[in-house]
Amino acid sequence: MAFFTHQITRTLCSSAVRNAAIKHVTVIGGGLMGSGIAQVAAVTGHSVVLVDTSEDILKNSAKNIQGSLKRVVKKKFADKPEAGEEFVQKVMNNISTSTDAASVVQKTDLVVEAIVENLKVKQALFSTLDKVAPAHTIFVSNTSSLPIADIASSTARLDRFGGLHFFNPVPMMKLVEVSIAAGTSQQTFDALLDFTKALGKHPVSCKVSHGSKEDIDVAMKLGAGYPMGPFELLDYVGLDTSKFIIDGWYEKEPENPLFAPSPLLNKLVAEGKLGKKTGEGFYKYK
Ligand SMILES: CC(=O)CC(=O)SCCNC(=O)CCNC(=O)[C@H](O)C(C)(C)COP(=O)(O)OP(=O)(O)OC[C@H]1O[C@@H](n2cnc3c(N)ncnc32)[C@H](O)[C@@H]1OP(=O)(O)O
Ligand SMILES: NC(=O)C1=CN([C@@H]2O[C@H](COP(=O)(O)OP(=O)(O)OC[C@H]3O[C@@H](n4cnc5c(N)ncnc54)[C@H](O)[C@@H]3O)[C@@H](O)[C@H]2O)C=CC1
């Protein structure tokens, strides 16, 4: 619940948004994910336009957002129901809706796409929007599985294209994977990190070359609900013990790539870095 307290505070004094590069957000797709993304962006003081294919779908999206906000305020404003109502109204005032993506993106800093998980449909959408959005506008996809480079290839703004992978349910899940393609600029990556933090979320970088043990551990904790990330857990178990286990499995199933020897694990064990019990493993403890 600290998360929501944090978000409410930000709504009431949204100077972070006033000074940020991304103030106006267009979310395309008002389903499960798009509604949640629009909600958290509005709660944190961004001006949001939610786009879908019909007014009926958008009415339903607004109803779902309102329902989710009411769950939040029921607890946060338990003894102040009027303040709770005011909060919901204020957040809803930050959200408008449209069925015409091409016209609304003309005034937006960021387009977040959360439509059907189909490469051709996503490409067709971005190709259209690329021709009408301002030059500074950043495009991102919330895709679960499609390569960002493949979606970005439908546009001429490869430097301003990335991925923001939110988790479901968006208002509750703190993790956002920030991913980029080869052409994404550092400026775009930084703006996406800042935006994710402004939402009160925890970004992990999915740059191909800069993934770190910390990012993997955070992703598994916040995205998959593990109490410890895999590297923390290995240190906790003991790297020597972990090596015995893996070597044993490898002896039994040498053809299984999951049990192939890990050069990094073997090196740490050889150096006596056995995890928490020796003060150092993947992490340092002293
Ligand atoms: C597919 C992809 O590309 C990537 C993905 O997203 S994979 C999916 C990742 N997501 C997960 O792993 C989700 C795992 N599940 C959970 O974390 C939890 O079950 C959950 C947060 C969804 C719900 O929590 P729960 O304790 O199991 O159930 P529930 O009792 O309904 O919710 C507890 C409280 O959470 C809050 N809450 C849950 N969902 C909410 C929502 N959508 N909006 C606002 N508040 C919500 C409410 O405060 C709720 O209390 P009330 O019922 O009194 O309103
Ligand atoms: N459901 C999940 O748990 C997660 C999904 N995602 C990804 O988010 C995206 C959306 O998923 P959901 O929200 O679950 O789907 P959904 O089916 O709930 O919502 C998709 C919405 O997009 C709308 N839409 C489709 N084509 C459109 C277009 N051309 N223009 C405007 N609106 C359009 C649909 O009418 C629908 O309302 C997918 O890429 C999915 O892989 C990512 C993380 C988690």
Image (cartoon, rainbow, N blue to C red):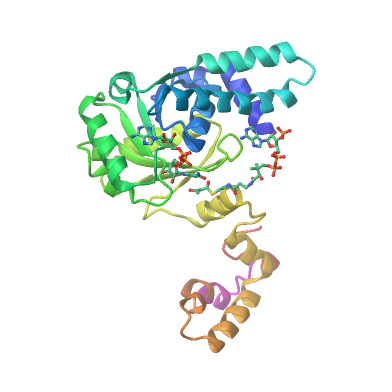
Quarter for ligand 1?
Answer: top right
Residue 197 coordinates in the image, percent (x, y) = 51, 33
Q: Quadrant of the C terminus?
A: bottom right
Q: Is residue 37 above or below residue 158?
A: above
Q: Which sits in the foreground, 6 or 273? A: 6
Look at 49% across and 27% down and name the residue there: 38
Q: Which region is colored magenta?
A: 266-275
Q: How many marks?
A: 0
Look at 50% across and 16% down and name the residue there: 94
Residue 4 coordinates in the image, percent (x, y) = 65, 29
Look at 23% across and 44% down and name the residue there: 153
The part of the image, by quadrant, that contains residue 188 is top left
Among all residues in the image, which is located at the extreme front? 56
Q: Is residue 275 left or right of residue 151?
A: right
Q: Which sits in the foreground, 48 or 285? A: 48
Asked whether residue 184 is in view, the answer is no
Q: Is residue 188 left or right of residue 47?
A: left
Asked whether residue 29 is in view, the answer is yes
Residue 163 coordinates in the image, percent (x, y) = 38, 42
Among all residues in the image, which is located at the extreme right? 79
Residue 16 coordinates in the image, percent (x, y) = 50, 22
Q: Is residue 221 above or below residue 234?
A: above
Q: Is residue 177 left or right of residue 154?
A: right
Q: Quadrant of the N terminus?
A: top right
Q: Is residue 26 magenta?
A: no
Among all residues in the image, which is located at the extreme bottom? 251
Q: Is residue 63 above or below residue 183?
A: above
